[in-house]
Image: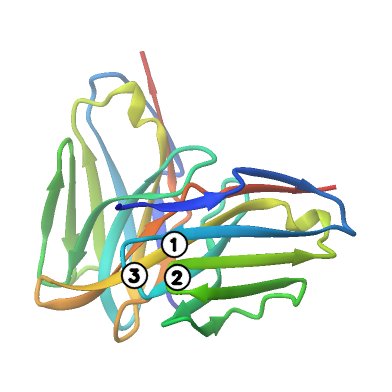
Amino acid sequence: KNQVEQSPQSLIILEGKNCTLQCNYTVSPFSNLRWYKQDTGRGPVSLTIMTFSENTKSNGRYTATLDADTKQSSLHITASQLSDSASYICVVSAGEYGNKLVFGAGTILRVKS
Amino acid sequence: DTEVTQTPKHLVMGMTNKKSLKCEQHMGHRAMYWYKQKAKKPPELMFVYSYEKLSINESVPSRFSPECPNSSLLNLHLHALQPEDSALYLCASSQVRLAGGALIHEQFFGPGTRLTVL
């Protein structure tokens, strides 16, 4: 069964600190892995997309890693800001063309001042 | 134009009402999606349209009726809904592109419609 598991479920950090979110998946056939940021009541916004041949990708203060052998990914946020408070969702694309998305439950991040 | 728009932002309806949610994109994407998202849960896929034809229906109750009038528009017609249908309804569109030696569907989400059924 295709599954994506994220940890921790929620996280509170102080502004300016770094944090790392984890994602483990069992999805076959694997096409690509994405990290989305979703503000409350809004649609998800893509942060990074990685295929099996990519093991790291950055987008500003966000850096995602992918280990296709262990089926693990992480999202590292550097120098957190209050606006980083959101749900971060790991999504793995399955299928030949990757158009079937398997969503993780998300990690709720709260950045405090 | 690099965004997916959805209207209305909020909708409150009774169980006997008929309403429609609208989604629009002008990025030339040929695949469009409807998702339902309950609070603190990930989005659940409802329907996929590919080249204006319904390609995936995830066993959604018939009180939800999708429609794709053209390649830029996607509607979701609602009729006789139940209170448990209250949720955030997300529309997405996707393009296929080559990345890292693989073809990927890159999905772009709209801001959603917050639906409350009384």
Tell me the kind of residue under disc 2. Answer: Met
Secondary structure beneath disc 3? loop
Tell me the kind of residue under disc 3. Answer: His
Q: Which image quadrant for residue B93?
A: bottom left
Of callouts 3 and 1, which one flags the residue occurring earlier in the amino acid sequence?
A: 3
Secondary structure beneath disc 2? strand
- Residue drawn 53% across the image and 56% down it: B90
In-front residue for pair B49/B35: B49
Residue A80, position as x, y percentages in the image: 26, 26
- Residue drawn 86% across the image and 51% down it: B14
Chain identifier of the residue bearing label 3 in the image:
B
In-front residue for pair B47/A79: B47
Residue A97, position as x, y percentages in the image: 29, 82
Asked whether the residues under the numbered discs 3 and 2 touch, taking CB atoms below 8 Å apart as contact, a structural biologist would say yes
Q: From the viewer's perspective, is A81 left or right of B118?
A: left
Q: Are marks 3 and 2 on the same chain?
A: yes
Q: CA distance from mark 3 to mark 2?
A: 7 Å
Asked whether the residues under the numbered discs 3 and 1 touch, taking CB atoms below 8 Å apart as contact, a structural biologist would say no
Secondary structure beneath disc 1? strand
Residue A75, position as x, y percentages in the image: 24, 47
Q: Which mark is residue B92?
A: 1
**Which residue corresponds to mark 3?**
B29
- Residue drawn 32% across the image and 56% down it: A23
Q: Residues within 10 Å of mark 1 (few under 14, many from 20)?
A: many
Asked whether the residues under the numbered discs 2 and 1 touch, taking CB atoms below 8 Å apart as contact, a structural biologist would say yes
In the image, residue B49 sits, relative to residue A84, either above or below, namely below
Tell me the kind of residue under disc 1. Answer: Ala
